[in-house]
Image (tube, helix red, strand yellow):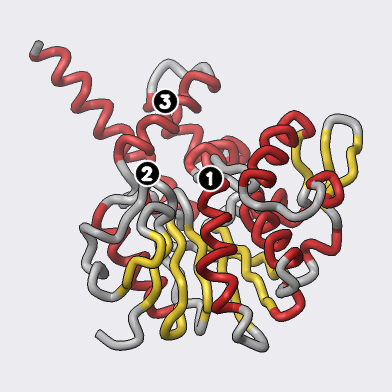
């Protein structure tokens, strides 16, 4: 038992050193990400790389930038799909769109946009509601490689069946195939969908406010942060939203146990759609 505990403590220390090395050498701070998420992703890369232990991985992180780029993709949060949780997008049409219709111009921020699937989902939704021309959409992620994928709007053809099903369940008004062209093993989304999208780098851990947003999407990102970082990011969102602006979180996320619980009112609790209170 003593040897087992010592092994686990050494492993924990090595993971901490890898995270510190990434911060010191490359400037990315994962120290407040969920320890379980960090460990899981490092284990994944350890298995793929063939290293015998985390000590070898630490050396590679420091000396091999290409290896670091691979590890950065592992540590990024890249699990998403188009019209993920269709009932959520249905709620967006029913609860947020009527408010957006009252604005001549509005701004939407997809924070931690990953490869852009949810950005394009919102673009399709706004186009079908006749609102896309009034929108400025910001799509941000700290990982430049994944942001490049988002800009391209190219996705595996294998995923289209699920995306199509999600779109239909979300109340899509057209044929989903109208929004892409097939090209070998991929599909390319219609270029005009990104007319109103500005892709840019933004790190939720270190960067500041995006001003006067009407809607912020940050779905299934906070679950990877510890409580302190969740509070800090929610404060950032609160300061970035205009009064009455909407915050959309993931299905397993909530503001209930955070410092910002009184700052928002639930609009669609099951779908995790909140609205910034005009006055506290």
Q: How busy is the neighbourhood of tag 1: few (under 14 within 10 Å), some, or many (20 plus)?
A: some
Q: Which residue is mark 2?
A: 19
Q: Residue 194: where, in percent of width, then height?
A: 77, 64
| Residue 58 visible (yes or no) | yes
Look at the image and tell me whether residue 20 can be seen: no
Image coordinates for residue 101, horizontal then vertical, percent = 63, 80
| Residue identifier under label 1 | 85
Q: Which tag is nearer the camera, tag 3 or tag 2? A: 3
Q: Nearer the viewer, residue 157 or 13?
A: 157
The answer to whether the residue labelled 3 contacts the one labelled 2, judged by CB atoms less than 8 Å apart, is no
- Residue displayed at 85% across by 59% down: 191
Q: Is residue 40 above or below residue 97?
A: above
Indicate the position of residue 159 as horizontal and vertical percent values.
71, 33
Question: Mark 3 packing: few (<14 Cα in 10 Å), some, or many (20+)?
Answer: some
Please tell me which residue is depicted at 49% across the width and 62% down the height of the picture: 203
Q: Is residue 142 above or below residue 267?
A: above
Q: Quadrant of the C terminus?
A: bottom left
Ranked by sequence position, the earlier of labels 1 and 2 is: 2
Mark number displayed over residue 116: none
Q: Which residue is mark 3?
A: 43
Q: Position of residue 254 (x, y in %)?
A: 32, 55
Q: Which badge, 1 or 3, is on the more N-terminal residue?
A: 3
Q: Secondary structure at mark 2?
A: helix
Horizontal placement of 233 versus 126: left or right? left
Kindly report which numbered mark, 1 or 2, lies closer to the viewer in this rendering: 1
- In this picture, is 127 found above or below 143? below
Q: Which one is nearer the viewer's eye here, 277 or 128?
A: 128
Q: Quadrant of residue 273?
A: bottom left
- The residue at the point 25 percent across, 54 percent down is 227
Q: Is residue 160 left or right of residue 138?
A: right
**SS category of the residue bearing label 1:** loop
Furthest-left residue in this view: 2
């Amino acid at each position: 038992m003593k040897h087992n505990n010592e092994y686990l403590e050494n492993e924990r220390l090595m993971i901490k050193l890898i995270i510190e090395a990434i911060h010191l050498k490359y400037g990315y701070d994962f120290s407040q990400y969920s320890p379980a998420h960090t460990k899981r992703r490092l284990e994944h890369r350890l298995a793929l790389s063939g290293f015998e232990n985390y000590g070898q991985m630490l050396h590679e992180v420091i000396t091999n930038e290409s290896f670091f780029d691979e590890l950065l993709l592992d540590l990024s949060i890249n699990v998403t799909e188009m019209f993920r949780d269709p009932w959520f997008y249905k709620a967006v049409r029913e609860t947020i769109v009527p408010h957006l219709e009252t604005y001549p111009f509005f701004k939407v921020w997809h924070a931690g946009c990953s490869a852009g699937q949810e950005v394009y989902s919102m673009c399709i939704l706004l186009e079908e509601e006749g609102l896309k021309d009034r929108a400025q959409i910001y799509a941000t992620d700290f990982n430049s490689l994944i942001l490049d994928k988002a800009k391209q709007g190219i996705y595996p053809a294998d995923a289209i069946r699920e995306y199509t099903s999600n779109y239909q369940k979300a109340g899509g008004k057209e044929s989903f195939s109208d929004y892409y062209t097939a090209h070998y093993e991929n599909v390319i989304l219609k270029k005009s969908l990104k007319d109103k999208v500005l892709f840019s780098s933004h790190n939720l851990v270190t960067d500041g406010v995006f001003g006067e947003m009407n809607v912020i999407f940050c779905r299934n990102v906070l679950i990877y942060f510890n409580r302190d970082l969740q509070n800090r990011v929610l404060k950032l969102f609160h300061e970035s939203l205009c009064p009455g602006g909407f915050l959309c979180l993931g299905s397993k996320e909530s503001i209930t146990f955070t410092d910002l619980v009184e700052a928002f009112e639930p609009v669609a609790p099951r779908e995790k759609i909140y609205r910034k209170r005009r006055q506290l």
